Image (tube, rainbow, N blue to C red):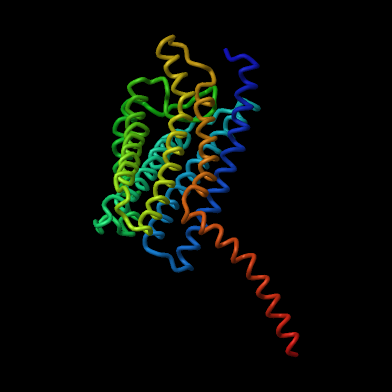
Amino acid sequence: MISEQTKINGFILSSVSLGLNTFACLISCIIFVTIIYHLHYNHVKRKDKITLVLCGHIYLTILIYSSILISMNIRSILGDLYNQSFNSSWCIFSGYLALIALTLFYMNFLNQAFYRLIRIVYSQNRRFQSLKLYIILPFIEIMILTCILLGFVIPLNGVIYLPNDHFCYPTLTNIPCILSEAVIVYLCPLCCISFIYIHITRFIHQQGNSQTLKIKQRQSRDLLITRRILIIVSLLVILGIPALVLIFRFIITGEEHPLLYRIGLFPVSVSQAGLSVALLFSIRQLKNTVLNLRTKKTVTPVNRAVQMRTITGTQ
């Protein structure tokens, strides 16, 4: 039986998570639309276009995953207030969809790391610097990963309805299921991302003083961006620690914390909100795109006013 204080704590967690996920959803939607507008109406260099496409994939995934989390938060709040049950086929489907969206979220960061590896370390390889490749890559990945994930999760009954939380989500207490999910969703992408960025950093340091000033400046920018993204990746790992601690507590004691899923998802909501802003200031092309659009909007009215004054003066 859940105590009243635990219910209040759960309600507070769901309410704060709802605010964070709504913020992440709005920011990611605005930036995603800005990227599409910029790519469609402005001339963009090929390498910058690929970077923006990869950023667009990340923000689209944040938008989808945040929307799913908002739905879960609303169901939790309504369930806490009115004791409603949301157990349905759509609920189970949304749980599987959340798992796939989270997997694609990490894979998009891996795609971004892979492109930086090719551009910096293997710059002579043009086959992997194709815009079409990075446009279709997430669609190929989602088909492959969906088959792999569902092949493991469905037989293990991985997504269940949580009556105390009033939403459906991949179970964190089914040990074989959570281990397979952890390897596919978290460990493999994060290990690959870490390995790639460490390799890039070592490559840049090994170049030494043998390069021209222009190349050195470009490498310095690449190194700065790499370090920023490594910090972001580290935060992705750190924010999963609360859920990991509670899972280990369940393995050792056999007791499931009543707020296991809400506590586990709260850092995820924090990371979605934080990443939607942090990426904007970490990637130069993305920052310039948003700032240039803002500059155009502020400059255009001024230009019109000057033109009107010129016309009035000539008359």
Relative to 263, 4 lies left or right: right
Image quadrant where one finds the C terminus: bottom right
**Image spot of residue 263 (x, y percent):** 53, 25
Q: Would you place residue 297 above or below residue 154 in this image?
A: below
Residue drawn where x is 42% and y is 25% of the image: 171
**Image spot of residue 195 (x, y percent):** 31, 37
Q: Residue furthest front?
A: 209
Residue 52 occupies quadrant: bottom left
Q: How many numbered badges does the structure rendering display?
A: 0
Residue drawn where x is 35% and y is 37% of the image: 194
Residue drawn where x is 29% and y is 53% of the image: 210
Residue in front for this viewpoint, 254 or 116 = 116
Is residue 298 visible to the viewer in this orientation of the structure? yes
Residue 150 occupies quadrant: top left
Residue in front for this viewpoint, 162 or 56 = 56
**Image spot of residue 209 (x, y percent):** 32, 50
Is residue 139 visible to the viewer in this orientation of the structure? no
Q: Residue furthest top?
A: 253
Residue 73 occupies quadrant: top right
**Image spot of residue 285 (x, y percent):** 46, 56
Residue in front for this viewpoint, 189 or 302 = 302
Q: Would you place residue 291 above or below residue 193 in this image?
A: below
Relative to 234, 297 lies left or right: right
Q: Would you place residue 256 above or below residue 207 in this image?
A: above
Relative to 296, 212 lies left or right: left
Image quadrant where one finds the N terminus: top right
Q: Would you place residue 215 above or below residue 271 in this image?
A: below
